[in-house]
Image: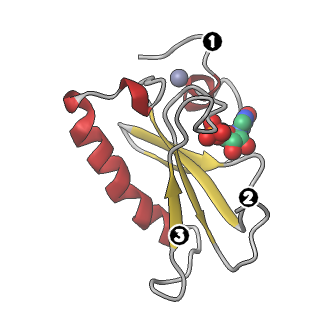
Amino acid sequence: MHDPDCLFCKIVQGRIPSRKVHEDEEFFAFHDIRPAAPIHFLVVPKAHVASMAQVSDAHAPMLGRMMALAPRLAMQEGCNPYPEGGFRLMVNTGAEGGQEVHHLHLHVLGGPRPWARG
Ligand code: 5GP
Ligand code: ZN
């Protein structure tokens, strides 16, 4: 379930501190240490999956639940309502996809613009 060398597995287990946004049986969400927008947090499955490149049909229900959870957490964290507000969901995959941490994570970004990056 956990990779002992994985940064986000360590965060999920509380071995590295983070600012928690949400936790349930399946997911852990925490603020990004280097926010690119006024609101920027990450949602990760607790079970280690390296990236979207490793997902199979078996992961589809988990991915669906992760996508469905994100809007609820976005509102909880203060994103403004759609359509004037909203949020961005992003999953970087592999080096050319801009992925730095190899534990699948959904970026949730929002808040008033301009944003620091993007
Ligand atoms: P990636 O580039 O892999 O899509 O995104 C990794 C994200 O994790 C980056 O936005 C980076 O700021 C964030 N990050 C890296 N190390 C840590 C950490 O130790 N704690 C937290 N909270 N975020 C981290
Ligand atoms: Zn991991």
Mark 1 or mark 2, which is nearer to you?
2
Read off the residue under disc 2: 36
Give the residue type that dot 3 points to.
Answer: Phe
* Quadrant hosting ligand 1: top right
The disc label shown at residue 75, or none: none
Read off the residue under disc 3: 87
Read off the residue under disc 1: 5
Dot 3 falls on a residue whose secondary structure is strand
Give the residue type that dot 1 points to.
Answer: Asp
Mark 3 or mark 1, which is nearer to you?
3
Write the residue at 65% across / 24% down. 7
Mark 2 C-beta to ligand 1 under 8 Å: yes
Give the residue type that dot 2 points to.
Answer: Ala
Q: In whole angstroms, how far apart are the C-alphas of marks 3 and 1?
A: 31 Å
Dot 2 falls on a residue whose secondary structure is loop
User: Could you tell me which quadrant the N terminus lies in?
Assistant: top left
Tag 3 and tag 1, C-beta contact below 8 Å: no
Q: Left or right: where does residue 117 sit relative to residue 23?
A: right
Dot 1 falls on a residue whose secondary structure is loop
